[in-house]
Image: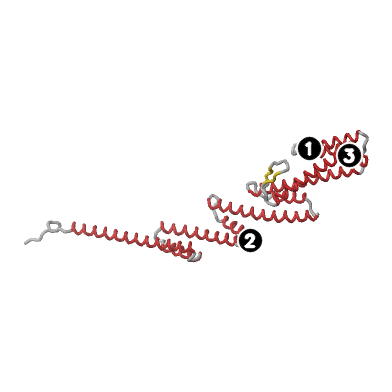
Amino acid sequence: MGRASFGGAGDYSQLFASLYTQNTSNLERLASAAESRNKEAQAATDNDMFDKWQQGEIGDDEIQAYIAKRVGETQTDPKEHAVWKKAQREYADRIADDSAELAFKNGGSISDIISYYGGRLSGVNKDSPAYREMSERLQGLKDQQSSEAINTGSEQLMDEIDRGTKSYADLVNFYKTKLAGVPASSPLRSQLESALNQAQDKVHEQKVQTDFNKLQYQFDAGKISGKTYGNGLRSLAKQFEVSDPARYYQILSAATKADKQSSGGGGGGGGRSGSSKTSINTTIDAFQGTKNQLEAMIDAYERGAKTYVGTDGKSIALTPA
């Protein structure tokens, strides 16, 4: 009895091949399912570790050590490895930034945190969001440092002005020097300009008061005539023509009365009439009003007020440094 040839009626190669393919497919499916379960379990472990860090159950060193471990474990999976390498960089920077900010908040030196961010910026690409964000934070800290130095310096100068050892002209020069070092884009610049304007107003007010006191003394002492006194008042009044028209005409009125006294035969000194004394008192009141208003405005500014309401009812914006 002859044997059946291979591939004939008794050939099972196709059946075996089909069973092998099916078995391989099942093994791959099982392996994929096992891998999926492993990834889910690993993801749960990863999430649990980060949650523990957020809740304070583990510290910065522990979370960074865990991230480093996962970097090592994922070297055979380029995509997963890249994710953990990115996390390693980001969390290292985040933890360092948070630590520097906390140290500063708890009384650390502003110079130290400025130095920290200066170092961080040196390693960051300038064409990146991270660089722009850190640059903004660094400039804010520099502005704060400058503001504190300006406040301290201006307070010391004000103390010396009160003692009579410095003048408001010194304060003006101080503000000008500080202003030269502040970038045009800095919010501090507008505050400093406002403080400078306030100091310049004070210098101007003191000059007006000094000039008037000198003129008044010369007239009271009989060193100048009523006409000369009137001309002096006109000169002083000129500066109020635009800024304070009411005071401008008030002083001009006093000057006109002084002229009339002079044309009526009165000289300077003791020959003044009652009307002349009235005009002089009016003039003194006008200048005293200017002095009082400026002093009140400066006092409001130094107390941190946002606005000052003048005697005319108008609001003047103040921007404390």
**Label 3 crowd bin: few (<14), some (14–19), many (20+), radius 10 Å:** few
Residue that label 3 marks: 274
- Verify CB contact (< 8 Å) between mark 2 and mark 1: no
Q: CA distance from mark 2 to mark 1?
A: 52 Å
Amino acid type of disc 3?
A: Gly
Instruction: Please state which of the two labelled residues, at mark 2 or mark 1, is closer to the viewer.
Output: 1
Q: Residue at x 72, y 43 (%)?
A: 310
Q: Residue at x 65, y 48 (%)?
A: 183
| Dot 2 or dot 1, earlier in sequence | 2
| Dot 3 or dot 2, earlier in sequence | 2
- Verify CB contact (< 8 Å) between mark 3 and mark 1: no
Judged from the image, the secondary structure of the residue bearing numbered disc 3 is helix
**Label 1 crowd bin: few (<14), some (14–19), many (20+), radius 10 Å:** many
Quarter residue 284 falls in: top right
Q: Residue at x 85, y 45 (%)?
A: 213
Question: In the rendering, at what x and y percent does residue 251 appear?
Answer: 81, 38
Instruction: Please state which of the two labelled residues, at mark 3 or mark 1, is closer to the viewer.
Output: 3
Viewer-nearest residue: 86 or 296: 296
Residue that label 1 marks: 248
Amino acid type of disc 2?
A: Ser
Residue that label 2 marks: 109
Question: In the rendering, at what x and y percent does residue 49 appear?
Answer: 44, 63
